[in-house]
Image (cartoon, helix red, strand yellow):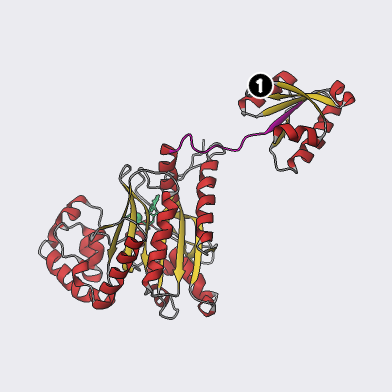
Amino acid sequence: MIQKQKGTRDILPSDSYKWQYIEEKCKKTMQNYGYKEIRIPVFESTELFERGVGDTTDVVQKEMYTFLDKGQRSITLRPEGTAGVVRAYIENGMASLPSPIKMWYAMPMYRYENVQKGRYRELRQIGAEIIGTNSYLADVEMIAMANELIKQFNIPEIVLNINSIGCPKCRQEYQEALKKFIGKNLENYCSTCKERFDKNPMRILDCKEKRCKELNKNAPVILNYLCQECKTHFESVKNSLEQLNIEYVIDSNIVRGLDYYTKTVFEFVSKTENYTVLGGGRYDGLVKELGGQETGAIGFAMGEDRLVDIFDKYNKENIEDIRADLYIATMGENATNVATILANKLRSYNICVETDLCQRSIKASLKYADKINARFSLVLGDEEVKNNVANLKNMETGEQIEVKLNTDDILSIVK
Ligand code: ATP
Ligand code: MG
């Protein structure tokens, strides 16, 4: 039998309502903040991610699904959303629209990952971006919105960690200090870190190897090297979060896995599952890097798979799948035709009505109605059609009521 690819998941009909619930809630929240949905292609030119995400990141060095198409173009399945969104922003001349542009997306991403708990190769992210402002107010709105997204799902022990990783200006001095620190022990780091030492030493702080993490323990902290502008920006973000009563912890170890981040970076971490559910930050250099004008921007991406997994764990009883309001069992061709017409009329009143599609006996039909957890059932045979009345049964209480076969009478009980 052909099986699904490692790291991919089937979201089955019995589970999809949980995903829909989360997507709906997120969409509503982001709409309330004035964000509009953007949809972009699943595949882009490989160069977009090499330049956008950064060619010394884990994503680009190890995780991309890259292939040549039949026209010999190097194509990559998007590993994340921001680079594509920024490409679309530039390509569609969105810089000339009223600024800032506020967008959200819900899309699958593809990363050749080491598959484990909460780490898939096809992963779904719900994310948001603000492009066109340098103000700390955008950082605050992003974090507040992310906070609200997560808080509405009734999940315990999610902590907000924030940091500032400065701008290219303050990074210069910092990188020298960092290189001095790492250089002393460079031979003990993993081969990827060694490679990154000259090109991008900050990447070494994001290494997942245990021995590298250990060696990084007393590394200099970028917060101590921020320039005045970055410092003021970060102070303003923190003050506003306090005013909004949003609790945060400063975590000077956050550097994030993508190269484009500047200034504010943040993560919402689940203490119970020990992984990050949402990560984001400012990326003031990316629009220019990808060919646009220098433009301030900030965004986040939430791991929907991780969120659904935790949500499911703690909210088993709190949400319910849609179920049939009414199941109509029939006997004979005439009754079946009447049932089909009646069901269609009832559905136009926005209720869920199902009919027998297997030509089963009444008994077998009712057994099925019970299995799918229908709220009411109606049995129609020639006699019922002739008299225009039938028994409507409440499947939970067993109570039966005689109803006329018209929408008003049925709806008055079922709706
Ligand atoms: P990590 O350091 O854990 O690999 P990352 O820096 O790669 O994270 P981002 O690229 O910022 O993470 O992605 C944002 C969010 O998307 C993560 O916080 C996580 O919730 C989710 N995510 C990232 N990679 C995966 C994956 N392979 N499977 C499931 N969810 C993922
Ligand atoms: Mg990663």
Residue at image position (19%, 54%) is 213
Q: Measuring 54% from the left and 39% from the top, which residue is drawn there?
A: 12
Residue 413 placement, left or right of 373: right
Q: Quadrant of residue 249?
A: bottom left
Above/below status of 309 relative to 64: above
Q: Which residues are magenta?
A: 315-329
Secondary structure state at the residue bearing disc 1: helix
The image quarter containing residue 404 is top right
Provide the major secondary structure of the magenta segment: loop
Whether the magenta-drawn stretch holds residue 383 is answered as: no
Q: Quadrant of the C terminus?
A: top right
Crowd around label 1: few <14 · some 14–19 · many ≥20 (10 Å)? few
Furthest-right residue in this view: 386
**Horizontal and vertical percent position of residue 108:** 49, 54
Question: Residue 245's quadrant in the figure?
Answer: bottom left
User: Depth check: 108 or 335 in front?
Assistant: 335
Q: Is residue 34 above or below residue 125?
A: below
Ligand 1 located in image quadrant: bottom left
The residue where tag 1 is placed is 367
Q: Amino acid at mark 1?
A: Lys
Residue 357 appears left or right of 51: right
